[in-house]
Amino acid sequence: MRKGLEFFPYIFGPFSLALLVTLFYWKVIFGNSIFVFVDASRFFYPLWKWGGEVLKQGWIPLWNPDAQFGTPYFADPQMAYAYPPVPFFYLLFSPLAAFAALTILHHFWALFGFWVFARHQGFSAKASFLGSFVFGFSLHVVCSSWTPVALMTISWIPWIFFAVEKVYRGEKNGFLFLSIAWAMQFAAGYPVLTYLTTLAVFMELVWKIFRQTPNRTGWLWNRMGVLIGSGAVALAYNMVWGLPFAELFKLSNYEKGASRFQDLDWLDFGTFLSPFDQGHPLLPGYHGPHYWVSTYFVGLPTLCLLLWGALRLAYRKTPWSLLPLLLALSLGVLGFSPFLRVFFPGYSLVIHSGYWLALIVFWMAWLAMESLEVFLDETLSVRNSLLWGGLVAVVFLASFLVSDSTHAPFSALTFGGSLALAASAFLSRHPWFRWGFLALALALSLGTAASSINILLDKSYYEIPPSTLGLLAKPGRIFFTPPLLKEAVILQGDNMEEAYDAAKEKMYPNWPLAFGREEVPIYNTLTLKDSFAWTFDAFRYSRHHSRKVLDYLGIRYVFGKNNFSDFKKISPSGNMVDISENPSPMPEWFSAQEAVGGGASLGADFLMADKSGMDYAKTCIVNDPALAGRYAKRKVESQSQGPDHFWITAEGNGKAMVASSETAYPGWRAEVNGKDREVETINHSFRGVVLNDGETQANFAFEPVTFRLGLFCSLVVCGLWLGIRLKGEIK
């Protein structure tokens, strides 16, 4: 019996946390619900489904030919294909099951990681459980499921701090744990959070060295090399996507996408006390902030504990002084970002001060644990009871006033129940009763708020294709007009179900990919500059030029209003969106009869093409003036072998310029008669190849050197990890 009781603390935490996650997601695990909110449905589900289907066909999804004339897939960090759980789950399970499992299991991984970290720090089972609850069910972490790669990245934060502590103490397997944890966090899809986690790790280490390390010089010599080595190994593992990403990044319009983000201000800071002071996402007409980068809420009882710990000087081993620093960095209104961009390499990628929130809630949960340890050990006295009661009264009154002044959604029952339980926590001498009252108060304050934003819809939302899809009987690319794209940024409807059904029926960008269709615009902050220009800038000239461009780009269907009289309207009366069919889209590969030298910019060539009435079906623009001239007409056909391998045949005689509306990108190579042939760039953005008389076939393959070199680095790192595990840790 005694042995069982001694073992209880070790199984209490993981089992209880797994039970909490199961209860929180029971509608997904046991019912027919699935995650839909914001980017979950509009970005990650369709793109991950596309990648999973390619993977099941036996291909590594390096290239996506169905989005924006073709774009790198593996190189996009948010596809997370160097992160083993993503390809593994999508290879084994259906897209819906994989999508749900990634979110649920990573939420548990965050909670379990915090439990392991807390126990390793020496906190009791009671404090570790409460700290795990605060971190894992903070509104920031719960809302991160709306951007699944953010949740996956955040879930590794406690594991990294656990591994860093192992290195700091010189414990066995510190190097192995830290390098793997860092590598996995970096690969999980939101590398900017890994960057901030690394900064926070070194802040904590500096604090430890000066507060807790007697022999600082010796520690630096013995342990700093292990830390730097772990980071280098983690970075090397991620070269498999990092090198291709570097290529993608410099050719992308990331800066334009980043301009949509804003820093946090004092109204966001008010979410400490009132989580929905800027509205609740389920309220009609809500167009407020994206909550995962704008809410600080960790539950009112947690704030009471933090104040208690500060007044009782409870913080002995937790780096409490770093919390104000993190808070200051998160508030963009204070203006620290420009300074940090100058002095910290890479900080320019931190385009939202709210990215610090994951570390802030981690720190608050950490501090709350140490405060709770003191709280549970305090003697029952009038002085302590009055102090605690006063803190509870101040925090809950402040919350009520903020909610009232901002007209925030407010539940009197939840608020009152949490207040009564928190205030009663110091009425008992027994630590278990005190802990129980606080846990229940936190469940009412934080748990109910978190549950209210666990936003789900029935699985049929993904399983049943939109009725609009039935109108698209022919193959061809889908184009969305700029006004329709502006509407797609904000979901609109009288309620959530209506708003999401409307988005699905309008097949907003990325939705076509979920149903095997090609689309021109893609909803992403990381798109190619040249593709972006052909999506928007090409249509800023005359109607005649726009009409020719639509044909050249192979656009079959236009979603949104247009003024082309020869387009056939195919959407029925009363449909949510106007859909028109282009009667004359060109094939994606064709034979150009003339090539002309390009100007200084794509915009200048658009202007030239507009004024001259250039027909893109017959004439193309080439970067190399030596290629300018007349070419023979050929009959061109293309056949795909996979997303990044295909061949073309060009029957006929004479020298031919075979042109396309498929993206020219580093890594594409062509082969004619068994020999490499230069892939030409035509119209500034697309691929072409010159075939001499007698040559009738060319094979194309996307084989970027960056991927092959990165893959070699990753395999070497995996071999290193295996070797260390088999032969023992090198201290």
Image (cartoon, grey):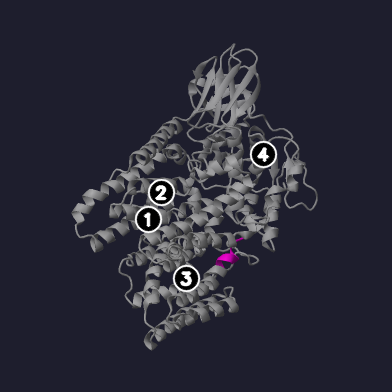
Check disc 3: other Cα within 10 Å, few if <14, some if 14-19, many if 20+. some
Residue 161 vs residue 238, the one in the foreground: 161
Q: Position of residue 677 (x, y in %)?
A: 50, 19
* Picture layout, residue 690 above or below residue 184: above
Q: Which amino acid is tagged 3?
A: Phe
Please report contact status of discs 3 and 1: CB closer than 8 Å, yes or no.
no
Q: Secondary structure at mark 4?
A: loop
Q: Position of residue 574 (x, y in %)?
A: 79, 53
Residue 516's tag is: 4
Mark nearer the N terminus (2 vs 3): 2
Q: Which amino acid is tagged 2?
A: Ala
Q: CA distance from mark 2 to mark 3?
A: 30 Å
Question: In which quarter of the view is residue 551 placed?
Answer: top right
> Is residue 351 rendered to the left or right of residue 486?
left
> Is residue 434 rendered to the left or right of residue 491?
left
Extreme bottom residue here? 382
Q: CA distance from mark 3 to mark 4?
A: 44 Å
Q: Secondary structure at mark 2?
A: helix
Mark nearer the N terminus (3 vs 4): 3
Q: Which amino acid is tagged 4?
A: Gly
Q: CA distance from mark 4 to mark 1?
A: 43 Å
Does the magenta segment cover residue 454?
yes
Mark nearer the N terminus (2 vs 4): 2
Residue 538 visible in the snapshot: no
Please report contact status of discs 2 and 1: CB closer than 8 Å, yes or no.
yes
Which residue is rendered at x = 42% and y = 41% of the image? Answer: 238
Q: Secondary structure at mark 3?
A: helix
Chain part drawn in magenta? 449-455
* Picture layout, residue 323 above or below residue 166: below
Please report contact status of discs 2 and 4: CB closer than 8 Å, yes or no.
no
